[in-house]
Image (tube, grey):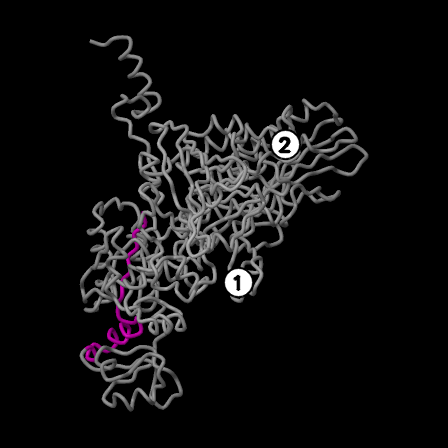
Amino acid sequence: MSTPLSQALATLRRRHGEGVIRSGDTLSGVEAWPTGLPILDQLLTPGGLPVGRVSLLAAAPGASGRLTLLQALAAAASRERVAVYLDLVGSLDPGYLADLGADLTALLVVRPPSGRWGEGLSMARSLVAAGASWLAVALSGAEPGSSPRSSSGWEHRLSILVESVATRRAVCLVSATSPPPLALGHAASLTLECAADGWEEAHGDVLGLRTRLTVVKSKVSAPGETAVLLLRYPRTFAAAEAVGRPAVVDLPLTAEATDVPAAAAG
Amino acid sequence: MGDFRFLCARFPHLALVVTWRRHPELRTEPVVVGGAPELRLPVLAASASALACGVRPGQPLREAQQRCPGAAFVPAGEEEVARLRTELLARLYRLAPAVEVGDETAWCDLTGRHAAHPDGTGWAVAIARSINELLDADDIAVGVAASRLVAEVAARQSGSRRIRRVAAGEEAAFLAPLPLSVLPLDPAVAARLAALGLDCVGAVANLSAADLQRQFGPAGMDLWRRVRGGDGREEWRPGGGVDQPGMPRQLGERIVLEGGTGDLEALRFAVHRCALELGDRLRRRGCRAAAVTLVCELEDAEPSGLRITPLQPPGGGAELWPVALELLAGLPLTAPVTAVRLEVTGLEPGAGRQVDLWRGGDAAGEEIGGAAARLRARFGGTAVRRAELTVDPGDLPERRFRWAEPVAVEVDGDGRGRRASGPAPGVAREPVPPGTPAAVMPALRR
């Protein structure tokens, strides 16, 4: 016996296709892009950065490791796909990215001539719409020329970018200073707060920076989890001992710290 | 590596097959193709028994005779070889959408599903049978893998009349026990790896990308990718797609406004009509435009025009109309407008285009390259770039790299095709010079 509801469902399916209405239990879960760093993947349940959503790395001004982490993940992504690095800070050093193991031929660096966020976001959106499936965005502290009272419309461009990221099933990781702009905070499905946890030293040399990561917002898993990573700085000219030395040292330095290879290659 | 499947078939040199067709009695004899041994010519191909005697392609014919005195020396039938190659190409095109045929190797794209051969193995078998029927040769070896490189190695490792399939994701495991000589490596890199005691692919695959890049510079990344079964990205050149024949270079629509008008609503209406008509023509031809120009002809004044490179190339009226509206908003109008004309240039196939499969790229790479080229055309050459490590970095950190274009873009006069997406780089909007001829526009009078 057909009810008005079943008739309406049949009409919608006939008009728009079978897949337009499905029961909740048939929907697939959130897809994730594994970072290759087990402790980070574990923190970012379900197993990495969410695909088709915007993730945010936020940190207070000062050394926190968020840009190094952003660049290390972008470097890892460039080895498997075409990645885009939107450099709104204007301080990207490709040599450092190469030290992190990036495939520079597959990494497009985008710098809007005006430095405006809106322009950069629309440029990034064009590349995502064309098929670039991994996007890293390094935001400056504040948009140049903007004032707290006026908006240059970058929020609208951000919403268009978010839509493209969702449509094209791309991974988007944004790095911003804390507190992040309101629109960005709303748009992000996952927010990681970075904070420096101290330098890692050996024999008087600084080996890297320990960074404490806290999931402060997550639409894909439970927030509140914390992990400590060691961001090991690459040694550019240490070529003599490079070959044969494993890049991934899987030895936790403390009970809760694990080594994030500057070159997250394996 | 994506969801690609490539088939590589290795067969005897086509010149040898032609020789066997002409002289069936030579099938069991050592044969050297290239000409008479008195000629100062190189060996083009040799049969297996001649190869066993030490004859090699490229060797002088005289030396080949010394190594294999009993061999039959036959001239290369170039016309017959070309005919056979065309025949093979036509056969393979019936089975695969993208095909490349060489003298000893054929490549087919097995990505996706074939209507008649839904099973990938059956598809590969059908292709192998088709090649075998045409060439009638015993030693045809086939490899199927997710990358061109691994497919070729699999074909080399495969026995005669056998198909070697490498499952997706198992490329690195397949390559690991093989010697490094199976990979196309720079001799200097190969020698250095040998000096370090790395003699098989798996030993190099255990090293990280950063380590290899530190040791070998840019070649290190290629090596890192190759040992995992990836194709060389140094050949990643989006934009090399095949142009469709007969594609017009530009299209235009023109509407005459009787008596001239300065009414913005009337202009908007006319431009809208132009955009819809032009978009319809674009859609019918299955192409899209890299650049859009709007020109308003003014009463007793020079025409005023603007050109723009849209970030998304329009391929229909709905996409063309916002671009035209943006142009209209930016056009300075100092006198009543007597006619509007809308032109689209840099036309390229919109869909169903043959992609540039054989240069290590893919359709997505081409799309990204095209988008990057459009951004550079609109925002300037520094808007989208990629970095390259320099060979001799020196001491300063900023000398370790140099900026380069994201893709190899060739720009011709009017920005035609993907290789030339848009007008001259660095120009966001170009005013159209007064008196620009209507070119190929049909003089539509309404």
Q: Is residue B296 left or right of residue A17?
A: right
Q: Which residue is mark 2?
A: B326
Residue B383 place in picture, x, y as percent: 59, 46
Q: Is residue A88 left or right of residue A232?
A: right
Q: Is residue A23 visible?
A: yes
Magenta segment:
B3-27
Q: Which residue is mark 1?
A: B390
Whether residue B385 appears in magenta in the rendering, the answer is no
User: In the image, what residue type sits under mark 1?
Assistant: Thr
Instruction: Give the chain of mark 2.
Output: B
Residue extending furthest right? Answer: B300
Q: Secondary structure at mark 2?
A: helix
The image quarter containing residue A145 is top right
Between B69 and B87, the one lying in front of the other is B69
User: In the image, what residue type sits under mark 2?
Assistant: Glu
> From the viewer's perspective, is residue A46 above or below residue A18?
below
Name which residue lies at 31% across and 42% down: A255
> From the viewer's perspective, is residue A145 above or below residue B380?
above
Instruction: Give the chain of mark 1.
Output: B
Q: Which mark is residue B183?
A: none
Residue B130 place in picture, x, y as percent: 23, 59
